[in-house]
Structures are given as structure tokens and as C-alpha cells.
Amino acid sequence: MIVRIMGEGQVRLADGHLAELNGLDDELLAEMEKGDGPGFRRTLTALLDRVRALGDPLPDDSLEPSELILPAPDATLEEVRDLLSDDGLIPG
């Protein structure tokens, strides 16, 4: 699976990591629903850190179709709300 982190680039991520990332996505969604800004920031950072750690970066000049697009690390809670569907950022 190709994942794009907005403002950073793309990584190739094995599908086997989706369950772990879904847990963080569920936390992020709950924090957004509560309006928990500090929790949102902490969990978004953790989610992006895991994607970076588990994925293999693609070259900057590579333009693969992204199957998943994650917000930039400095995205606000409101900006991420606009990106979310009812299912969160990571398809289950």
C-alpha cells in the first residue's frame, strides 16, 4: 500500500501493518470527537511516526497513486476533521 503524508511524501507500507495503525486511528477519531486538542496532537504524531517507521520511503520524484493520504504533522484538529470520513483516516 502506498501512503502519502501531506507535505512530506510517500511511503510503501505492508498491508499487515494496518491493524496496528487502525488502533491509533480509532484513538485519533475519539479525541477529535471529544475536542481533545492535546490528545489529538499526541496521537497524530504517534500515527505519523509509526507510518514513517514501518514504511519504506519512495523517492521524491516518484508519483505512485496513494491508497491512503494522511494529514501533515502540523495539521489542526479542524483541518483533519475536514479530511475524515465516518471511518477515520485508515480504512478498516
Image: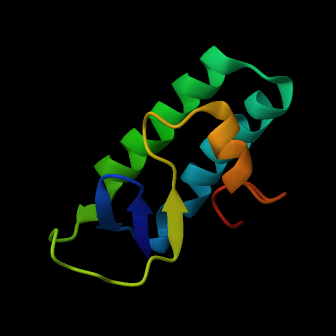
Which residue is found at the position 64% from the left and 44% from the top?
80
Q: Work out whether residue 45 or residue 79 is closer to the camera in this orientation and state it.
A: 79
Relative image position of residue 39 (x, y in whole percent): 64, 20
Name the image colouring.
rainbow
Q: Is residue 63 above or below residue 89?
A: below
Which residue is found at the position 72% from the left and 66% from the top?
92
Q: Is residue 75 left or right of residue 37?
A: left
In the rendered image, the quadrant that contains the N terminus is bottom left
Q: Is residue 90 above or below residue 29?
A: below
Q: Is residue 71 left or right of residue 65?
A: right
Q: Is residue 80 above or below residue 59?
A: above
State how many labels appear.
Answer: 0
Which residue is found at the position 63% from the left and 27% from the top?
40
Q: Work out whether residue 78 or residue 67 is closer to the camera in this orientation and state it.
A: 78
Relative image position of residue 11 (x, y in whole percent): 31, 65
Which residue is found at the position 61% from the left and 41% from the top?
24
Q: Is residue 74 left or right of residue 91?
A: left
